[in-house]
Image (cartoon, helix red, strand yellow):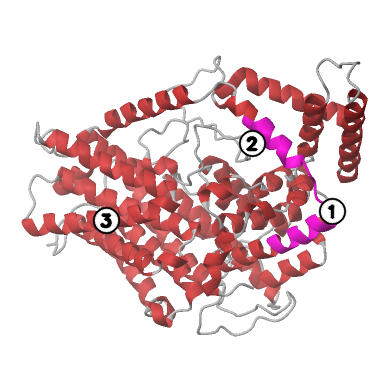
Amino acid sequence: MLQPGHGSSLRQLPEAEEPLHERQRAQRPMFLLRQIRQDVQLREPTRPDASDPEEPRRLDAAELRCAQLRGLLRSLDPDLDIESALKEADGQRAEKEDTGSASHTPDESDEVTPHSYEWHEGSLSPECKSSAHENDGMGRMAMLSTHDSGYLGTSSGSQLLGEIDSVIHISDAAKQQHQQQQHQQQQHQHPTSHRKRLRRSSSSAGQGLAPTECLHLQSTYVAGRLMDAYFLLYNTSYPVLHEKTFRERVDAGRRQRPGHSPWRVVYQMVLAIGHWLSSSESEHLQSGYYSAARSSLSLQMLESGTIETVQAFLLMRNYLQKRDRTNTGYNFGGLAYRMALGLGLHREPPGSEDTLGHERRRQLFWTIYCFESGFNITTGRPPAMSQDFIDTRVPRNIDDKELPFKAPVLPSVDYPTTYSTIIAHAELAKIADAVYHEFLLAKTAGTKIEYRVAETLERDLDRWRQALPAYFVAPAAECPSWFRAPRAVVLWKEQNLRILLWRGSRLQHSYLPTKVDAEEKCLDVAMQTVHDIAAFCLALEGALHPGIIWYATYFLFQATLVLEGNYLTRAAQSEHDRAAWQHSVSKSRACLKALAPRSRPAKRCLEMLDRIHSQFHTCRSSIPIWADKPTSGLAARRTGL
């Protein structure tokens, strides 16, 4: 197990050490099919020259090479019809070359209305890159257009951008910049460059295959490092897997099970997430672990219900959301949720027996619940679950690292464990669902949450924070290094929920005097969010990894948009308020600028903030920007509507 202080060393894993043979075995060996085709194209002359004495030798070498690849292919998948598969692969390649980028758009015969919300996200496979999707993790959050993004509701970040755009029209500048970028790309891109790049990567990947023993030793070492990264940096926030059980299965060789099994998907997704968390963005773009997991999926997985299948879908769901495949991940989350209900994870097990196996069901269910709750608020989509039919208890803070599944549940401990974060997440998700329910009801009715209702929900959040164990609020020096990031994300989520609550509330109480109005409460929380995230990233810069950077960027950008929107729609501001706004926005920009070299989402969010400021100064020089729409968007809050 890696020690917490060694997280940064994980990012130094050389790309060449990636377990190639594992990826080949798991990808329904399409890699070898491509290699056979490449060898035929590259080694066999188009017009054999009978006068060349080296010609027979080259042909013999090509035939031997193809025979070796076919033999290896049959050992990996004895049931594969090689000739049919080659024809199918050639047909797919020809279709892609003919259609080009059109393969990612709806059929021309389809009638697509302006608000159809259709989306085409494409694959994350390294050899299937799409210019429309840059795999930057949350690209749509920093974009105005909802084209090809699916439905995004009023609680999403795009709504905040839309409100700002209604005032200063940043979409016009964004369109011009996008057109310029497209024009530059077209000028510098040769029509056949993508095809040649694919052929080069396919050809070079298969040359000089190492002996099986060397590959096994190499992949075992790398896989061990990636599993360490997964359990240290991911599972401590979302305990989808039990570490001891998982590692025992790996050691027992269960990763060698048939390709189309839930275990194969789980295993490859652990490696994919571990690689994502321990690599740079450019390195991870070339990773094949997710592709291997995706290739191991089959409809047979839906024909039986198992905990492993739920875990597989759940890992794919969260990974895809982080990699800007929001809707694809949303669908996998739906599969995980429905299968969990089919397995009865939402109900307490009957009988008096209480083992770690029962506790694992609780941990898994509440992880699903937290994913669903957070995702719905992030995208503004309606909830699919309700607490009314759930009686599964929230997990307990136990230390079960060395215990088997059948062991009785131990008493809770008073220090951070793998389950400390999900416990806090679960209790917060219950309140979040209540807040979101009121938010959606008000939006549907064309109004805002009553101030007195918002006060009640705020008290629930206050009680939640007061009930947190001491290690959630202890100084960083007194907190275990591995726990600092998980606890920070929980606290940022609570602040983001408060922003949503007061952003969607009436300005004041209907009939009682109000000391602090909803707008002021919202701004205070937004400024505190900016301060907390910036301070965290500055203090722990060396320990930041892509997972925590993703959350920091998301919550920081949303809080900053709230501040920007309020400033743009205020008719007048005191000098003190203006100075506080400038300080917070400057701090946010400095934090995003520090994260930008390691995160494309942070870079795009920073660019959007710069665009807002540039457009704001342009508009301010011509007209008073708050005069046109005094009750629209964020400005409506000042009238209490």
Estimate how packed mark 3 is, as few (under 14), some (14 to 19) or many (20 or more) residues with alpha carbons within 10 Å. many
What secondary structure is marked by label 3? helix
Q: Amino acid type of disc 1?
A: Thr
Q: Amino acid type of disc 2?
A: Glu
Q: CA distance from mark 3 to mark 2?
A: 45 Å
> In the rendered image, which residue does mark 3 sit on?
502
Q: CA distance from mark 3 to mark 1?
A: 60 Å
**Magenta-drawn stretch contains 107:** no
Report x, y in % for residue 31: 76, 38
Q: Amino acid type of disc 3?
A: Trp
The picture quadrant where one finds residue 430 is: bottom left
What secondary structure is marked by label 1? helix
Residue 558 visible somewhere in the drawing: yes
Cβ atoms under marks 3 and 1 closer than 8 Å = no
In front of the other: 184 or 385: 184
Estimate how packed mark 1 is, as few (under 14), some (14 to 19) or many (20 or more) residues with alpha carbons within 10 Å. few
Q: How many marks?
A: 3
Residue plotted at (60% across, 22% down): 192
Cβ atoms under marks 1 and 2 closer than 8 Å = no
> In the rendered image, which residue does mark 1 sit on?
212
**Segment colored magenta:** 197-222
Q: CA distance from mark 1 to mark 2?
A: 24 Å
Report x, y in % for residue 296: 74, 46
Residue plotted at (13% across, 46% down): 570
Residue plotted at (30% across, 61% down): 529
Pair 1/2: label in front: 1
Q: Of marks 3 and 2, which one's residue comes earlier in the chain?
A: 2
Estimate how packed mark 2 is, as few (under 14), some (14 to 19) or many (20 or more) residues with alpha carbons within 10 Å. some
Q: Of marks 1 and 2, which one's residue comes earlier in the chain?
A: 2
Cβ atoms under marks 3 and 2 closer than 8 Å = no
Q: Of marks 3 and 1, which one's residue comes earlier in the chain?
A: 1
> In the rendered image, which residue does mark 2 sit on?
127
